[in-house]
Image (cartoon, rainbow, N blue to C red):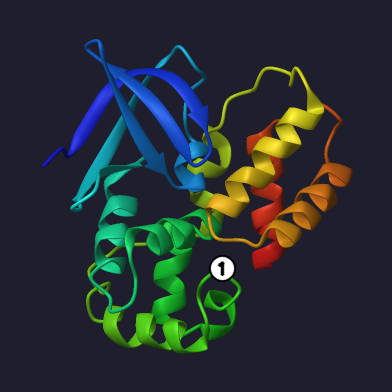
């Protein structure tokens, strides 16, 4: 089991990134909450990881901290929730916020996430409530991820940034038309040279609110 990686960030195309660890490139899929906390390309990053082995592939998922990985692991234990849906959930809502949704049985918030219908939301609450009791949470305003993202370099091509953002949302489970509309709306609220990550972040926030 590969549980942790530290290396130089080579590429990041949400939700995928490439990490150079001692000359070996590890392709990792990460939640958007982890992407917001990544350093710039060329800098060293540290990720907690979870390896999923299938008959046709070995998939590595990366997380900025232990808690997000722990929530991911609890999610995939839930009936009907695979790694892709678990990562989608943790892209649309922070680990702390998800724990609070389960604790307070907030079905209304959970069903706003792609791939989570009412039955799935209710199943998550029923199956995970006891398992998440030992997790500690903090007020959203104190969550370090809100201030952890460093300044990004200006986008070389705005169109490419928007296309990358739309592709990321589609990969997370949103329908193409829904992704396009959300990114267009987000772009109107941000500066013209906004990065793909900034567009994704605002789009996800608007769709969950």
Q: Which residue is mark 1?
A: 114
Label 1 element class: loop
- Does 42 sit above or below residue 47? above
Confirm whether residue 13 shows in the render: yes
The one nearer the camera, 69 or 171, is: 171
Residue sitting at x 80%, y 56%: 181
Identify which residue, 58 or 42, lies in the foreground.
58
The image quarter in which residue 122 lies: bottom left
- Is residue 138 visible in this depiction of the protein? no
Bin the neighbour count of mark 1 within 10 Å (Cα to Cα): few under 14, some 14-19, many 20 and up: some
* Residue 157 image-quadrant placement: top right
Task: Give residue 129's position: percent from left, percent from top.
Answer: 30, 81
Asked if residue 56 lies left or right of residue 138, the reply is left
Q: Is residue 185 above or below residue 7?
A: below
Q: Is residue 93 above or below residue 52?
A: below
Q: Quadrant of the N terminus?
A: top left
* Count of numbered circles in the view: 1
């Amino acid at each position: 089991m590969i549980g942790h990686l530290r290396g130089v960030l080579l590429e990041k195309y949400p939700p995928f990134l490439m990490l150079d660890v001692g000359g070996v490139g590890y392709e990792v899929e990460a939640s958007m909450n982890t992407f917001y906390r990544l350093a710039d390309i060329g800098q060293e990053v540290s990720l907690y990881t979870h390896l999923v082995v299938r008959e046709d592939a070995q998939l590595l998922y990366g997380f900025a901290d232990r808690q997000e990985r722990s929530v991911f692991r609890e999610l995939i234990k839930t009936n009907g929730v695979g790694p892709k849906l678990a990562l989608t959930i943790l892209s649309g809502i922070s680990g702390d916020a998800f724990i609070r949704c389960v604790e307070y049985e907030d079905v209304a918030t959970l069903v706003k996430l792609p791939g989570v219908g009412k039955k799935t939301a209710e199943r998550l609450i029923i199956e995970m409530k006891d398992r998440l009791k030992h997790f500690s949470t903090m007020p959203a305003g104190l969550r370090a991820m809100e201030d952890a993202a460093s300044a990004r370099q200006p986008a070389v091509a705005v169109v490419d940034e928007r296309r990358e953002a739309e592709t990321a949302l589609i990969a997370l489970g949103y329908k193409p038309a829904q992704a396009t509309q959300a990114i267009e709306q987000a772009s109107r609220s941000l500066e013209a040279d906004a990065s793909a990550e900034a567009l994704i972040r605002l789009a996800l926030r608007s769709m969950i609110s």
